[in-house]
Amino acid sequence: AQTVTQSQPEMSVQEAETVTLSCTYDTSESDYYLFWYKQPPSRQMILVIRQEAYKQQNATENRFSVNFQKAAKSFSLKISDSQLGDAAMYFCAYRSEYTGANSKLTFGKGITLSVRP
Amino acid sequence: DADVTQTPRNRITKTGKRIMLECSQTKGHDRMYWYRQDPGLGLRLIYYSFDVKDINKGEISDGYSVSRQAQAKFSLSLESAIPNQTALYFCATSDFREQYFGPGTRLTVT
């Protein structure tokens, strides 16, 4: 079974600075997807970024980028130019690529990010 | 209008009561899911369904049941609610790229 580990329960960043959120995972599969979801106080789950394991290039979405290290099974999220609206809980998640799987997501426990003005 | 809707958004109920959480989607997806979120535990899968005739247990299905009334509707029931089922519940649908979450239902069992 796959597992996702987010070892830091909380982090804080100064507005306009850069912060990196860590995530590691364990799997025996070679094809899979990795995601970062943001959950603001509204509790809505918002997809931040998505990475396909077969792609060597790291995904980027505006101020958000990932450092995907497949051999190390590491998937960190970097937020540049942090804004007050980035304050939220962030979840790392894994999904198998295989069609026999159920497309379910396996989540980490989440990390609470606060942004200091 | 939201693609995935959940009702109610908040509910307080008493121990032993039966309660149903409803989920509807307009995305036309076959795959639907129910997750539970607890502080410090992330989201965990309760049940999932590939279509109206295919329903499967997730990792924490004890104490829950589901019904897939149509492609667009997937309901979660607590037959006899207990306090440790107090949590935030999410419904989701998926295509081959990603999952799409509803707004969540905050359930409190007293």
Image (cartoon, coloured by chain):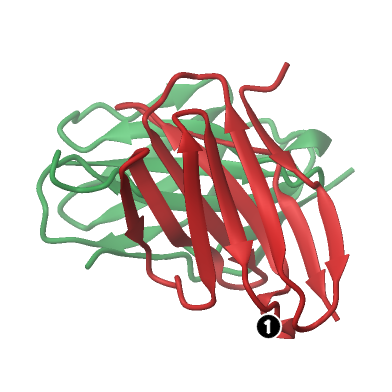
Residue B14 image point, x, y percent: 85, 78
Residue A99 placement: quadrant: top left
Residue A73 image point, x, y percent: 24, 56
Q: Which quadrant: the C terminus of chain A? A: top right
Residue B52 placement: quadrant: top left
| Image vertical order of residue A21 relative to residue A37, above or below | below
Pick the front one: B19 or A83: B19
| Image vertical order of residue B63 relative to residue B87, above or below | below
**What's the residue type where badge 1 is placed?**
Asn
Residue B57 seen in the figure:
yes
Q: Residue furthest top?
A: B1
Pick the front one: B41 or A81: B41
Q: Which quadrant: the N terminus of chain A? A: bottom left
Residue at the spot x=44%, y=40% of the render? B32
Q: Which chain is red?
A: B
Residue at the spot x=50%, y=19% of the render? B27
| Image vertical order of residue B106 relative to residue A31, above or below | below
> Is A112 left, or right, of A67 in this rendering?
right
What count of labels does the image hold?
A: 1
Dot 1 corresponds to which residue? B84
Colour of chain A in the image: green
> Is A45 left, or right, of B44 in this rendering?
right
> Is A115 left, or right, of B61 in this rendering?
right
Residue A107 seen in the figure:
no
Residue at the spot x=73%, y=16% of the render? B1
Residue B19 image point, x, y percent: 72, 63
